[in-house]
Amino acid sequence: MGAQRVAERFTELYGAAPQGVWAAPGRVNLIGEHTDYNDGFVMPFALPHQVVAAVSRRDDGVLRLHSADVEGGVVELAPTALAPGGDAEWTAYPAGVVWALREAGHAVAGADIHLSSTVPTGAGLSSSAALEVVVALALNDLYGLGLRRWQLARLCQRAENLYVGAPTGIMDQTASACCEPGHALFLDTRDLSQHQIPFDLAAGGLRLLVVDTQVKHAHSGGEYGKRRAGCEKGAALLGVDALRDVPYDGLDAALAGLGDEEEVRRLVRHVVTEDQRVERVVGLLRSGEVRAIGPVLTEGHVSLRDDFRISCPELDLVVDTALAAGALGARMTGGGFGGSAIVLTEVTEVDTLTKAIEEAFAGAGFTTPRVFEAVPSAGAHRLD
């Protein structure tokens, strides 16, 4: 839904035109999975799919929320009454942002908000982060808070961690807030330093496909939290602040020092090797060797499948089928247990690969996947 239609719908709902319309994108993570909450490296880029929000400021202690994508009318809340754990619906995400802003000392008294999204939900493409960031950016502008993009991302992460109850890292919100068109974002999640890395697929005759398996996942579920807890246990056993501090060339010694903690050993191995894969991809892109990142992406999938154990039959089928059909590389992306995979391919092979994946899913009796091109796009911004 475009900005004009979102604004028109806002007017229908609330009886006056919005003070502005904002957008924030979903993201694809090129490489660097489950490294963000380990103080490691990630490399996402923004999608053209986005959450659009029409918003007006209120100063009377009323927060009104409506989504074009959820059945039901306007939900009215009191900002002063917001508290973590009290909302299991979609409204927890925008309400959590208001709560986080107020907890940080920003006098956000209320707002009227209407939302519309083209980011697939449950596909591992950060629809929740996009929703949080667009609300945060709008309120930042309307209330004149003067917060920088990385600060908004931090507050949105706090909202998702503490208010929603999903133990996600900082990557999703930072990608939605800070990415630039035509670039991937090389982010150090420890100090939040950022480098925009040119990622021009078209110039090299390449495409990156997203394959949404239609298998839904939920970050607030127990398995994601177990992986994070296991990583924290590994860091504690190794005597480091975070797994980021385990050097790649010291990995074998670190693994040997974990004794009979086999599950923790697998998690540590993935995180340390994944950080190294991010650095390899950055180096290849900086030197213009885009095709050469393909095998690194595939290595990442093997690690997520075998060590982190967060893949699923549908994701594995995408990767195996794509590689057999000639893809340069493929891997699952996002939190895992469903969601999407990415496939790096020559532009001339897009149709062939898409057909092969769809036929493989049909043969396995799986739901038909959604396949689309991932184009590095702009981060959050004001539309009107």
Image (cartoon, rainbow, N blue to C red):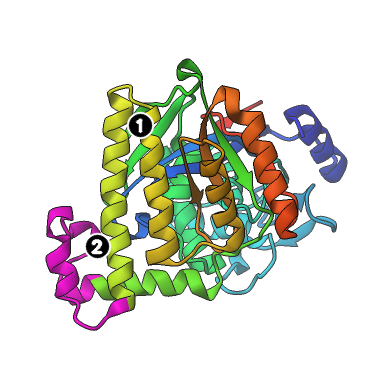
Where does the N terminus fall, quadrant-wise? top right
| Residue type for callout 2 | Leu
Q: Quadrant of residue 183?
A: top left
Q: Residue 348 carries which label?
A: none
Where residue 226 appears, x then y in whole percent? 43, 75
| Residue type for callout 1 | Ala
Which residue corresponds to mark 2? Answer: 243
Give the residue displayed 18% in from the left and 54% down from the top: 248
Give the residue displayed 34% in from the left and 74% down from the top: 230
Q: Quadrant of residue 271?
A: bottom left
Q: Distance between the residues labelled 1 and 2?
A: 27 Å
Q: In this rendering, would 367 be left or right of 338?
A: right
Q: In this rendering, would 244 be left or right of 8?
A: left
Q: Nearer the viewer, residue 320 or 311?
A: 320
Q: In this rendering, would 44 be left or right of 114?
A: left
Q: In this rendering, would 227 be left or right of 192?
A: right
Q: What element carries label 1?
A: helix
Determine the residue located farthest toward the front in the rendered image.
Answer: 324
Determine the residue located farthest toward the top in the rendered image.
Answer: 203
Which residue corresponds to mark 1? Answer: 292
Q: Considering only order in the chain, which callout, 2 or 1, is on the residue closer to the N terminus? A: 2
Give the residue displayed 67% in from the left and 63% down from the top: 78
Where residue 157 appears, x then y in whole percent? 46, 56
Give the residue displayed 44% in from the left and 36% down from the top: 178
Residue 277 visible in the snapshot = yes
- Tell me which segment is drawn in magenta: 235-262
Determine the residue located farthest toward the bottom in the rendered image.
Answer: 260
Where residue 39 appears, x then y in whole percent? 29, 56
Where does the C terminus fall, quadrant-wise? top right
Q: Is mark 2 on a helix, strand or loop?
A: helix
